[in-house]
Image (cartoon, rainbow, N blue to C red):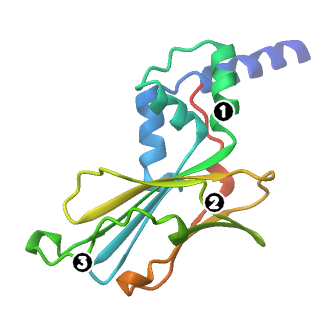
């Protein structure tokens, strides 16, 4: 009887974990209800921060193709799993009127910091990317995982050139390690 119960529990677990497609995974990561995407407005300026799990980066690197073997998956996870990836956007609601103060700032690395407890991490790289939104600037960053995470992570953004207050985005650790594969 206990073996039958364990077999049924194992089958249910397998069925529950097999239901994620690349499309549902991307929707999960992009859905603000899941805590990986945070947005706020300050006056006419809006900020959006998104923490991207390693499997999301793997999916991007493979142009959306999730068909990989276990050995390749483990190798890619080792490569991408050593960083926290963050996408950050800042824009103006006044952009449609041509009143946007935003400009592309190429050396923005010093404007971002990742905080965990008493530790703070600087970005290993911070690259402006073409987000395609009028009056907005988008960055992709990677922060090295220097030690195991044991709590929430806060992205701190400060750009004194824009005269806006320091922005903080705290990501709950509940969904950091959500996987696709």
Q: Are marks 3 and 2 in contact (CB under 8 Å)?
A: no
* Residue in the picture at 90% in, 18% down: 2
Label 2 sits on residue: 172
Secondary structure at badge 1 equals helix
Q: Nearer the viewer, residue 149 or 30?
A: 149
- In the picture provided, is 41 more to the left or to the right than 95? right
**Residue drawn at point x = 81 percent, y = 53 percent:** 147
Which residue is label 3 attached to? Answer: 101
> Which label is found at residue 131?
none
2 or 1: mark nearer the eye: 1
Answer with the quarter of the image where residue 172 lies: bottom right
Crowding near the residue tagged with mark 3, few <14, some 14–19, many ≥20 C-alpha atoms within 10 Å: few
Q: Are marks 3 and 1 in contact (CB under 8 Å)?
A: no
Classify mark 2: helix, strand or loop.
Answer: loop
| Residue at (56, 14) in percent of width and height | 68
Q: Badge 2 local density, few (<14 within 10 Å), some, or many (20+)?
A: some
Disc 3, SS: loop
Does residue 53 sit above or below 66 in this rendering? Answer: below
* Circle number at residue 79: 1
């Amino acid at each position: 009887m206990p073996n039958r119960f364990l077999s049924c529990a194992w089958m249910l677990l397998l069925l529950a974990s097999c239901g994620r497609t690349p499309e549902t995974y991307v929707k999960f990561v992009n859905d603000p209800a899941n805590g990986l995407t945070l947005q706020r407005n300050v006056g006419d300026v809006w900020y959006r921060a998104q923490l991207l799990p390693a499997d999301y980066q793997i999916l991007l690197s493979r142009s959306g193709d999730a068909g990989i073997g276990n050995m390749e998956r483990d190798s890619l996870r080792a490569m991408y799993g050593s960083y926290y990836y963050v996408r950050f956007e800042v824009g103006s609601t006044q952009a449609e009127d041509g009143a946007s103060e935003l400009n592309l700032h190429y050396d923005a690395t010093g404007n971002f910091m990742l905080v965990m407890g008493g530790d703070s991490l600087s970005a290993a790289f911070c690259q402006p990317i073409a987000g395609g939104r009028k009056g907005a600037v988008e960055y992709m960053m990677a922060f090295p995982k220097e030690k195991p995470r044991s709590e929430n992570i806060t992205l701190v953004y400060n750009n004194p050139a824009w005269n806006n207050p320091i922005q903080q985005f705290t990501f709950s650790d509940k969904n950091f390690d959500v996987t696709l594969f």
